[in-house]
Image: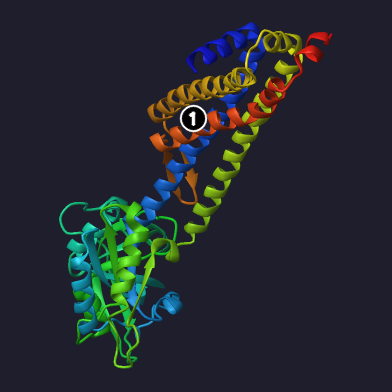
Amino acid sequence: MISILKLSARNLMRYRRRTLLTAMLISFGVIALLIFVAGAGSFKNVMIGGITDSMLGHLQIHKKGYTSAIENLPLNQNLQAGATAKIETVLKEEPAIAAYSKRIKLGAMFSNFTENTSIRLNGIDPVTEDATVPALRGRISEGKKDGLLVEPGHILIPTLLARGMKVKVGDGIVLVATNATGSVNGKNFVVSGILDPVTGPGGRDGYIHEADARDLLRMEKPELMEIAIRLKNIDQLAEVNERLSAKLEQIKNKEDKPVTELHTWKDLSPFANIVKMIDMMTLFIRIMLVSIVLVSVLNVMLMAVYERIREIGTLAAIGTPPGKIMGMFMGEGLLLGLVGAAAGIVVSLGLVALLNASPISFAFGREVITLRPVLTGVEIGWVLLASVVVSALASLQPAWRAARMDPIVALRHV
């Protein structure tokens, strides 16, 4: 096998210019694929991290039917204390969960004593919320960033609201809310922080302490609207979702129907569709790479067979087995793909290192995205394997044709 590859390499060096051009074309395809995959992967990770780590969490639990009316923040779709206790038992038994946060969600009127507007609010336990969505603290552009995320009597408000209502950190405001029975209640707050915007639902929400949320809604029982969950590893999302779904299905109401519904961040964020589009584009780029390698190697090997017909006839005439002739040509194609892909991988790693040294930043809506591309060993291995396999397959037909040549006919070829 090694002797055949050495012979194949020697034959490739006889046509250095053509070999170099073909290898460069394969390298270009590999570089284009790897840089796109690294950049697209970085964009996906930044956006997914921004959404899950600062707002949604990786998974969310609601009462059955809550998400169908989530835009209206229904107050009659609360998780009661008994169901919440059973849910927490399930969550504590799941080793893949890093943290979870119980939330009270409501709509309220926001007043700066001069103007009024509406606001969506999250009543949170600041300690568990900090553990579940650790990037939320990083979104505080103005105000205190240490200590409790939000203290009783204080509120975190989004930048758009602060600008529109001309409210600063330290200003007093009033929140007025209507509870499930139609009772109206108001409460004074102090603005303790202003939050940078982030793409997706929840990016314009305000945050208050859970005790204040209960006061506003005059809750007599410890009810909840939402439980956000953070996993230790987001790659386990699908399997954890499946396990939790099966266990939560066992929590039923008096009618023997499931009480809860479990959703992943993909079910709750429109960015999931952008992720699908990026994955589809990556698939198309992969197909383009395979096509480039296939056409390039096939063309070179067909030319090699055509130009060396008499040489093939001589090899056959002196007793060279057809299998060895076939292996020689397949070896040439395989080496072309291997060398081209290896060179492309080396250049791609250099470009990725350069992009990390001087990261690219651009505006995405109201956010600034900084790309720090990374190439995984799996992606590099896939590209190398695909290039070698496709090169070998592209060489198969020309090699088979060379091996089946009649030596007498081949030697007469002009």
Residue that appears at 33% across and 68% down: 60
Q: Residues within 10 Å of mark 1 (few under 14, many from 20)?
A: many
Please indicate whether residue 157 sits to the left or right of residue 371 in the image. left
Picture coordinates of residue 5, whole percent (x, y): 53, 15
Picture coordinates of residue 42, whole percent (x, y): 43, 41
Give the residue number, with chain letter if any, for mark 1.
384
Residue 405 vs residue 387, the one in the foreground:
405
**Residue 62, located in which quarter of the rendered image?**
bottom left
**Residue 79, located in which quarter of the rendered image?**
bottom left
State whether residue 164 appears in this view: yes
Please indicate whether residue 399 sits to the left or right of residue 259 in the image. right
Residue 45 vs residue 357, the one in the foreground:
45
Q: Amino acid under label 1?
A: Leu
Picture coordinates of residue 29, whole percent (x, y): 59, 29
Residue 200 vs residue 402, the one in the foreground:
402
Residue 354 vs residue 206, the one in the foreground:
354
Helix, strand or loop for disc 1: helix
Picture coordinates of residue 40, whole percent (x, y): 49, 42
State whether residue 104 appears in this view: no
Residue that appears at 18% across and 52% down: 146
Residue 93 against residue 44 in the figure, above or below? below
Please indicate whether residue 233 sits to the left or right of residue 211 in the image. right
Residue 100 against residue 143 in the figure, above or below? below
